[in-house]
């Protein structure tokens, strides 16, 4: 009889403590106004590579090179002529460009 009454008193005390703590949390605890929205990020590989099951061995590549050791006999280089001088107005500039 004593054990059951002690158990009842202990359980009532624990329930009262939990009830009081719950009321105090509702009164004094204010959650932050920041809301976090979970985002779903899919990891998509940038490049899909299929690897062969058999590793390739040594690959032979043949390269043909043509190297000329002589200097060229003719050359064609075009360059624009630069007209030196100061131009004060647009009319003078147009006249000078027409004369060329």
Image (cartoon, helix red, strand yellow):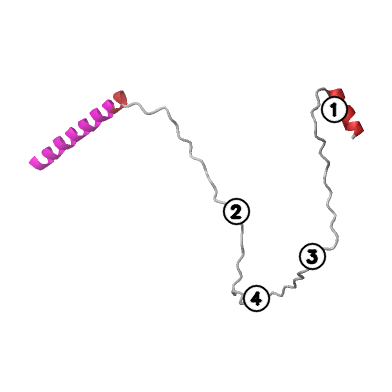
Mark 1 or mark 3: name the one nearer the start of the chain.
Answer: 3
Q: Position of residue 9 (x, y in %)?
A: 14, 35
Residue linked to disc 1: 93
Label 1–label 2 contact, CB within 8 A: no
Q: SS of the residue at dot 2?
A: loop
Which mark, residue 46?
A: 2
Which mark, residue 59?
A: 4
Residue linked to disc 3: 71
- Calculate the distance from the C-alpha at mark 1 to the C-alpha at mark 3: 43 Å
Mark 2 or mark 3: name the one nearer the start of the chain.
Answer: 2
Secondary structure mostly seen in magenta is: helix
Residue 1 visible? The answer is no
Mark 1 or mark 2: name the one nearer the start of the chain.
Answer: 2
Residue stretch rendered in magenta on the structure: 1-24
Question: Vertical placement of 11 versus 73: above or below?
Answer: above
Mark 4 or mark 1: name the one nearer the start of the chain.
Answer: 4
């Amino acid at each position: 009889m004593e054990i059951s009454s002690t158990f009842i008193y202990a359980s009532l005390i624990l329930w009262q403590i939990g009830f009081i703590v719950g009321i105090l949390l509702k009164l004094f605890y204010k959650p932050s106004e920041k809301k976090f929205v979970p985002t779903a990020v899919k990891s998509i590989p940038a490049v899909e590579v299929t690897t062969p099951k058999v590793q390739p061995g040594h690959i032979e590549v043949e390269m043909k090179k043509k190297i000329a050791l002589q200097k060229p006999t003719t050359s064609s280089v075009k360059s624009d002529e630069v007209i030196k001088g100061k131009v004060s107005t647009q009319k003078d500039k147009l006249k000078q460009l027409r004369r060329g």
